[in-house]
Image (cartoon, rainbow, N blue to C red):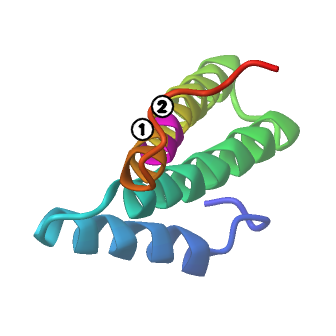
Amino acid sequence: MSESVPASQVSAVLAWAARLSAGPAGTVETAAYLTAKAAVLERIAADRAAGGWTPGDVAAARQAAARARESADAAALLAAAALLAAAGITAMKED
């Protein structure tokens, strides 16, 4: 594991995943978890690129980070939509 991504951060994300899988989670918490996961994977990918890992390993890390970021972005949109719906906002007005 990379020195610039502390094991404690990876452990925290894994523990968060375990909590989410243990029971129902809201869209906001899921989006926050996925964003944290994507950030850790992006840092790992950057560290691998800077650390002289093989091109295949770097590419795999970057792909995992990109997929995690896509999931995080989608979850954030769902969370925002849920919050807007809860507030009774169903359409945006144009000026």
- Under circle 2, the secondary element is helix
Q: Residue at x 46, y 67 (%)?
A: 13
Q: Position of residue 69 (x, y in %)?
A: 58, 35
- Image check: 2 left or right of 73? right
Mark 1 vs 2: CB contact within 8 A: yes
Q: Position of residue 61 (x, y in %)?
A: 59, 32
Q: Position of residue 4 (x, y in %)?
A: 79, 65
What main secondary structure does the magenta stretch of the protein show?
A: helix
Q: Residue at x 57, y 81 (%)?
A: 8
Q: Residue 9 versus residue 48: which sits nearer the camera?
A: 9
The answer to whether 35 is drawn above or below residue 49 in the figure is below
Q: Residue 10 versus residue 80: which sits nearer the camera?
A: 80
Q: Position of residue 80 (x, y in %)?
A: 51, 45
- Image check: 30 left or right of 24? right
Q: Residue at x 50, y 27 (%)?
A: 67
The answer to whether 7 is drawn above or below residue 60 in the figure is below
Point out the stretch of residues depicted in magenta. Answer: 76-80
Tell me the amino acid under the disc marked 1: Leu
Q: Which residue is mark 2?
A: 74
- Under circle 1, the secondary element is helix
Q: How far is the residue under mark 1 from the one under mark 2?
A: 6 Å
- Image check: 87 left or right of 25? right
Tell me the amino acid under the disc marked 2: Ala
In the image, is residue 57 part of the stretch drawn in magenta? no
Residue 11, numbered label: none
| Residue lying farthest to the right in this orientation | 50
Q: Which residue is mark 1?
A: 78
The answer to whether 43 is drawn above or below residue 92 in the figure is below
